[in-house]
Amino acid sequence: MGNENKPMKLAYYPGCTLKNQATNFDVSTVSSMAKLDVEVEELDRWNCCGTVHALDSDNVMNRVAPITNMIRVKEAQARTEGMASEFMTSCAMCYNTLKRANIDVRQRADALATINDLLYLDETKYEGDVEVLHLLEYLRDRVGFDNLAKKVTKPLEGLRVACYYGCLLVRPKEVAFDDVENPMVMENLIAALGATPVDFSHKTECCGAYQTVDKPEIIADRTDKIMGSAHEEQADLVVVSCPLCAFNLDYRQDDAKRLNPDFRNMPVLYFTQLMALAFGCDESALRFDLQHIDPLPALKARGLD
Amino acid sequence: MDTTLRINSAQVGSSFVAQIEKISGQKLLACYQCGKCSAGCPMAAYMDVLPNQMIRMAQLGMRQQLLETRAIWMCVSCLTCNSRCPKGIRIAEVIEALRKAALGGGERNDHLEIMELSPEARSVLPPIATISALRKLTS
């Protein structure tokens, strides 16, 4: 696909939530990549990325978990022909944490040496030589949206999609693979699938993240504002790349409705589910049953059930 | 909150200011109070003290007042402030340092009790939510 050195196999890091509540994100990622002739191979013995990047200066312990995954990538590469020293994740939170840890240890030889010492049970040492890729970045730069469009068997014509980036795909700037204030990569993907991306005011506004654990009333307010801004542009649904955004914007709609009686439900999907739908994957690759707000009425209204 | 403050050099030069600068890696006096961080903060509506006010209070060594705010626990490190600060100050790092000051130093002032949530509430939460909350809000 434009790159003669394209690896035949792509290492894949799913992350914890894709193996729990967000199975729909996992299966739609793997299934749609198969349609693009990219063989994804889940890493052996991957571990939690740590979810959040520690911002304080005393942070070496918090880099150990993400860096252990870099070693797993090197191990996979060593035993797999045609695998590059890189891996892909579709979870925005994992991407952000893993990418930031990688940038950090590349800049701090002393921290990396300490981490390698702590990981003495691993024969493979990390030398900053693994690239962290988000799936959207991979699709844009390696596959290409023109090539991707050729695989569409069921164009999502007429479907109005609001692409929600949240925080982790675009901030900080060192991690962003698109404009910090007005990213367009997801809109360009959605357009390649035949749908109509709609601009909306809250696409990079934080959903309130982990405050959902014990302050659902705050998330209800965030969800009301974010989904309300998508409604203003007559969106049929919102797509996301983060399982925490997905939980807040989808599951917390019940709380939003209690807060604001005028709140109207709107489905929230992973961008990979729309890809799998446009590529003609069956229900086992979509798992719409795991959505809190059923997307089928919105899809049926556009003739896409 | 009582906004009257008597400023003295001992407070401004206190070890608290040095501690926050060290943990955050930021120069607090770089802030000239433009307020851009607070203007764009998606969590500002739920804070008792705004991000630019937190920086000002930190500059002035107002340890106790700061560590008692709700605001330092509201920030979720979305980094909108960092990406827009005209002085390049990483405000989120400063707020993280304030949380660390509250959680460390033997006080262990945890701001989340998972077991106080109902079993129903706990059962629906994805691991990405609980792990990140525990990492940010507990010692």
Image: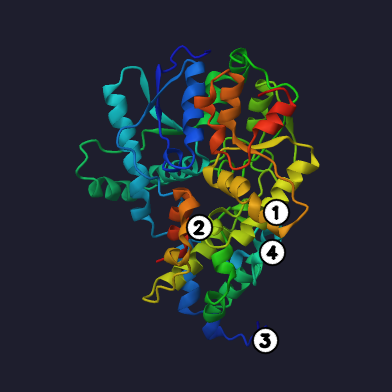
As shown in the figure, which amino acid type bears the numbered disc 3?
A: Thr
**Residue where numbered disc 4 is placed:** B45
Residues at marks 3 and 2, CA–CA distance in whole angstroms: 42 Å
Left or right of residue A279, residue A301 in this image: right
Mark 1: few/some/many CA within 10 Å (<14, 14-19, 20+): some
Colour style of the rendered protein structure? rainbow
Front position among marks 1 and 4: 1
**Foreground tag (3 vs 2):** 2
Secondary element type, mark 2:
helix
Q: Which residue is mark 1?
A: A257
At a point 48% along the width and 40% down the height, the residue shown is A95
Indicate the chain on which mark 4 is placed.
B
Residue annotated with mark 3 = B4
A94 over A32 or under it: above or below: below
**Mark 2: few/some/many CA within 10 Å (<14, 14-19, 20+):** few
Q: Nearer the viewer, residue B8 or A232?
A: A232
Disc number placed over residue A196 in the picture, else none:
none
Q: Determine if marks 3 and 2 fall on one subunit.
A: yes
Q: Name the residue type under label 4.
A: Ala
